[in-house]
């Protein structure tokens, strides 16, 4: 979800995953996950990535991962809301 771009910057790439996020929304709804769960997951994931990247971890990577996780959580929450009203 985070890729190094030709300009050397790290950015979130979530657009091509939107269909998958819709399926994830259905899976998460079945498990009664709440928006706060996504925040906790995101914090743990970023901390784990930081730990395993060690000195290769940068502020840019952190920002890109945080952006990707926030976008994914938004897409999942939106799909959940759309599914609840359908």
Image: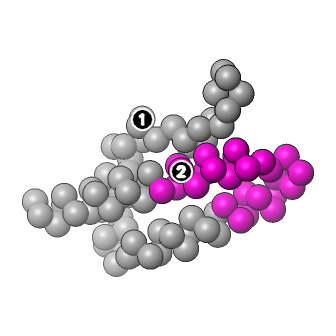
Vertical order, 27 against 68 (above or below): below
On whether residue 76 falls in the magenta region, the answer is no
The answer to whether marks 1 and 2 mark residues whose Cβ atoms lie closer than 8 Å is: no
- Does 29 sit left or right of 81 as displayed? right
- Magenta range is 46-70
Location of the C terminus by quadrant is bottom left
Q: Which mark is residue 67?
A: 2
- Helix, strand or loop at disc 1? helix
Q: Which of labels 1 and 2 is toward the front?
A: 2
Residue 75 image point, x, y percent: 35, 53
Residue occupying the point 73% across, 64% down: 48
Q: Where in the figure is residue 22, as x and y percent of width and height? A: 31, 52
Q: Which residue lies at the image location 17% right of the left edge and 66% below the top edge?
A: 84
Q: Give the quarter of the figure containing the N terminus.
A: top right
The figure's colour scheme reads: one colour
Residue 69 covered by magenta stretch: yes
Image quadrant assignment for residue 26: bottom left
Residue 16 has which mark?
1
């Amino acid at each position: 979800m985070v890729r190094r771009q030709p300009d050397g910057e790290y950015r979130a790439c979530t657009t091509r995953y939107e269909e998958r996020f819709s399926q994830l929304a259905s899976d998460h709804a079945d498990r009664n996950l709440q928006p706060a769960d996504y925040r906790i997951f995101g914090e743990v994931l970023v901390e784990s990535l930081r730990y395993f990247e060690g000195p290769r971890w940068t502020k840019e990577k952190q920002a890109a991962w945080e952006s990707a996780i926030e976008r994914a959580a938004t897409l999942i929450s939106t799909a959940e809301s759309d599914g609840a009203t359908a």
